[in-house]
Image: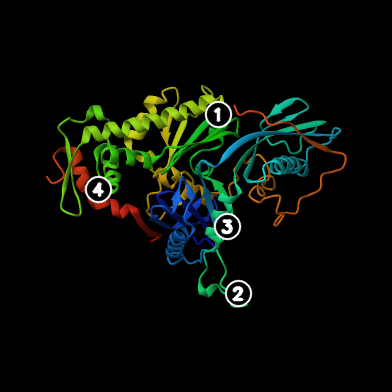
Amino acid sequence: MNNDKPYIVGLDIGSTKICAIAAQQNNLNQLDIKGLIEEKIGEGAVQNSSIANIEQATKAIDKVLEALSSRVPADVMVVNVNISGDAIKGRRELATTTGLNGESMQITDLTNMARDVQRTYLSKNTDQLIIHSLPQEFTIDGITTIENPIGRVGVQFAADFYLITIKSAIYKLLKNTITNIKGKEIEKDNYGNVPNLDINSVIFSPLADSLAVIDDNDRRSGIAVVNIGGDTTEVAIYHRKGLKHIAVLPYGGRSITEDLEQGLHIYPESAEKLKYVSGLAPSKEINPNEIITIRLDDGRVQRISAKNAAIIIEERLKEIAAMVVAEITRAGYSGMLNGGIILTGGTAKMPLTEAIFKHVCRDFHVRIGNPNRYVTTNGGLSITHPKYATVVGLALAAFKRLDERVPASILELVVDDYRSQVHQTPQQPQPERKTERTSPQPEKNENGGGFFGRMMGILNKSIPADDHINYTEK
């Protein structure tokens, strides 16, 4: 069946790779993926999950999107893009409205409350932008509800909002990187100008992951989405349908690679390959005599103890898992997440990752996120790898809201800076309904013998193919 709906493009900018997909929404409100491009990004272009070299990053993104455009019958001109990094912060704000006088809550009332919270925060934090403003729970005449409040009758209404913020300079750097990319010559306008790439929406990475790997039941019962990225591990905690807490932890997959590099005195390229070989089994199951042999480009040979490598990987994963548990406890949700912990990101695919998290996070059900959950057509490409959760979620964001309880108008303006007023036409609050904001509240053979030697031989051949993926639907 032909799908004449427009193409959706998700662009995942990571510390180690750039991934983009072109997809269409089908009649089941799921994705038909038509093309996927994945490329490694040069060192130094993205650091701590933020753009560090705009020229280098622009070239890398342009290359990926150009390849994607050549493989689907559409020109890539608008993207949904992720944003990450330790500069992202979350905070809870409470707003109240009085003067309903027994009338029903309207979309305008809730929209005005969200905007009031945003304006008040930005007036006191002039170097920040709000990228998400998500409702947590609602109170009507003292009765708390987590359901959609529109249409409910009452006198006084209150709502908790969770603001996710970032420094303006970091957001503008991302935006400039994207909008510096030119479209194709065939897309010239009537004046002969080639249009620039544009951004439809910017989404915090674990929230994009959430769209791909969890459902409404997970959000209601409580779940932590943990994205183990290249430089950082990001956590998003949901409970009673709302986003309750986020955190950015300073370690990720690259930390494991660096540990192997320093601990075993090997090159970064060798350490990256070794990570996925020694990450296949716990150290206690590895024979102490198991040796992995690495041949370098200059002809030298390095012999590495598979058991020592696995121990190094385990120790770093234990630290990351312990930090996740500590963050959940600090936020006040220990024992409250019936959905447990769901892991995404490239490092989540290593068997050791799931095993270590299950051992350290023993009070939680731990599982790997499957981004194929809302994908109907993938043309034979396996989208089940958790590293694709972000890019699939970005595509889903074209028709799935980050919070289905409230209208899109509550969520759609959160990227723009209220100080600029460029793309905004705020509705005026009704005179008889006064909105108040309370003070912020704290957040609750050659490669050696044995299994690993054989796997190293396979990886020496297969790793480059995984670093560069060009896919189009057959």
Q: Which residue is mark 1?
A: 221
Q: Nearer the viewer, mark 1 or mark 4?
A: 4
Q: How far apart are the two marked residues, 1 and 4, measured between alpha carbons?
A: 40 Å
Q: How far apart are the two marked residues, 1 and 3, measured between alpha carbons?
A: 33 Å
Q: Nearer the viewer, mark 1 or mark 2?
A: 2
In the rendered view, would you say 154 is above or below 372? above
Residue type of the residue flagged with mark 3 = Ile
Residue nearest the observer in this picture, 447 or 472: 447
Disc 1 is placed on an element classified as helix
Q: Earlier in the sequence, mark 3 or mark 4?
A: 3
Packing grade of label 1 (10 A; few <14, some 14-19, many >=20) is some
- Pinpoint residue 1: horizontal percent, then vertical percent: 49, 60
Q: Earlier in the sequence, mark 2 or mark 4?
A: 2
Residue type of the residue flagged with mark 4 = Leu
Disc 3 is placed on an element classified as strand
Q: How far apart are the two marked residues, 1 and 2, measured between alpha carbons?
A: 50 Å
Residue found farthest to the left: 445
Q: How far apart are the two marked residues, 2 and 3, measured between alpha carbons?
A: 19 Å
3 and 4 marks in contact (CB < 8 Å)? no
Residue type of the residue flagged with mark 2 = Asp
Q: How far apart are the two marked residues, 2 and 4, measured between alpha carbons?
A: 47 Å
> Left of 458 or right of it: where is 351?
right
Packing grade of label 4 (10 A; few <14, some 14-19, many >=20) is some
Which dot marks residue 189? Answer: 2
Disc 4 is placed on an element classified as helix
Which dot marks residue 199? Answer: 3
Q: Earlier in the sequence, mark 1 or mark 4?
A: 1
Which dot marks residue 459? Answer: 4
Q: Earlier in the sequence, mark 2 or mark 3?
A: 2
Residue nearest the observer in this picture, 312 or 35: 312
Disc 2 is placed on an element classified as loop
Residue type of the residue flagged with mark 1 = Ser
